[in-house]
Image (tube, rainbow, N blue to C red):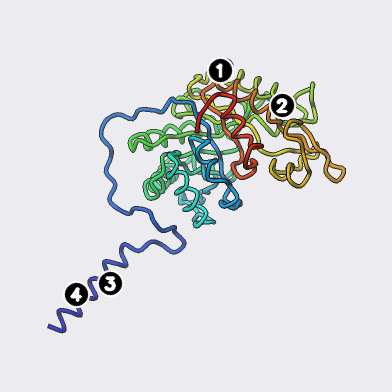
Amino acid sequence: MRKITFLSFVLLLGLLSCTKENEGVPDGYSYAAHVLPEGEYVPDNSFKIVAYYSEARVPDSIELVKFKMITHLHYAFAYPNTDGTLKAIAQPARFETMIQRAKENGVKTAISLSGGEAVYSALAADPLLRTKLIKNIKDFVLKYQLDGVDIDWEYPRLNKANDITYEAFVVELSDTLHRWHKYLSAAVTPALYQGSVKEGITPAAVAAMDFVNIMAYDGIGWDNQNPNHHSTYRMAETALNVWLTEKGLPKEKAVLGFPAYGKTTANVALAYRDLLFQGKANPLENSVTIQNATYYYNSLDVVKQKAVLAKQNANGLMVWEFYQDANGPQSMIKAANDAIGRTY
């Protein structure tokens, strides 16, 4: 009897060890067997407000009501290894907190993949490594019960044949994710400058995605009417027009990005919340000087104008980055919601 009891105890320990999470992995996620959903995948074509969240930021500094002001939360970032595996999340507790808070507020969640251009170029060009990476991405999404994946490869370039390999990568990834009823998006260049980056994403790649997040910022010097500013309304309007007309992006897939930070002409950035509370910036103005450096940012009025533009000519707004926005009545995300009459 004692032998049977001992063997039963060993067996129980073995079963428990099989279900234990890996070291550093957040608690509270299902390890149950995954079953392919029935029916065809149906993309979500509703208006989106996408917020990227950088894991370097502190979750508790974001008011809970802010989660009701967005529709999608993209956790940034996960990174691929050269062998097609994924690096462990650097801040697992923050990952768990942000994903849980998003889900509690009905916000869709995704992991955003970033990393070096050379790594992506090599992985996407090798069919075996590409498939391995895609499997690992899919497994990650299922493991943590996410709604999708965002690709932030900056940038695929025509002169490196990335237009071909990027297309192969996102088409295969999209097919895999859609079978599991998960979405695929990508952060993309504003396409304002002629060259290999502008042409690095093909129509077939765009067709494979559910939506694209147009990074209409970091363009110091582009707008000759306001050359010191890195993200003017004119820049947003032009970038959206280029994607819709020249690059053939369908309106329902277009998500217009705006920055929750300011920049100097020397390309030094400071979060919008810090501009307000450290530099005493006026949220109704577009620049502030702090210690002899002038930061250019979007006023709440400009954010509202961009929100209306996105509502009329696109199908969503995106902000980099969730934490950098202010809380309370001076919030950019709140201003965007108010401008388009979205309740939360």
N-term mark: 3 or 2: 3
Q: Amino acid at mark 3?
A: Leu
* Label 1 residue SS: helix
**The one of 4 and 336 positioned closer to us in this rendering:** 336
Mark nearest the camera among 1 and 4 is 1
Q: Do labels 1 and 4 touch, CB within 8 Å? A: no
**The one of 84 and 103 positioned closer to us in this rendering:** 103
Q: CA distance from mark 2 to mark 4?
A: 68 Å
| Residue 121 screen position, x and y as percent | 55, 40
Q: Residues within 10 Å of mark 4 (few under 14, many from 20)?
A: few
* Label 4 residue SS: helix
Q: Kindly identify the residue that appears in the image at 38 percent across and 61 percent down.
A: 21
List the residue tagged with mark 1. Answer: 312
Q: Amino acid at mark 4?
A: Ser
In the rendered structure, the answer to whether residue 23 lies left or right of residue 311 reads: left
In the rendered structure, the answer to whether residue 272 lies left or right of residue 7 reads: right
Q: Residues within 10 Å of mark 2 (few under 14, many from 20)?
A: many
List the residue tagged with mark 4. Answer: 8
List the residue tagged with mark 2. Answer: 232
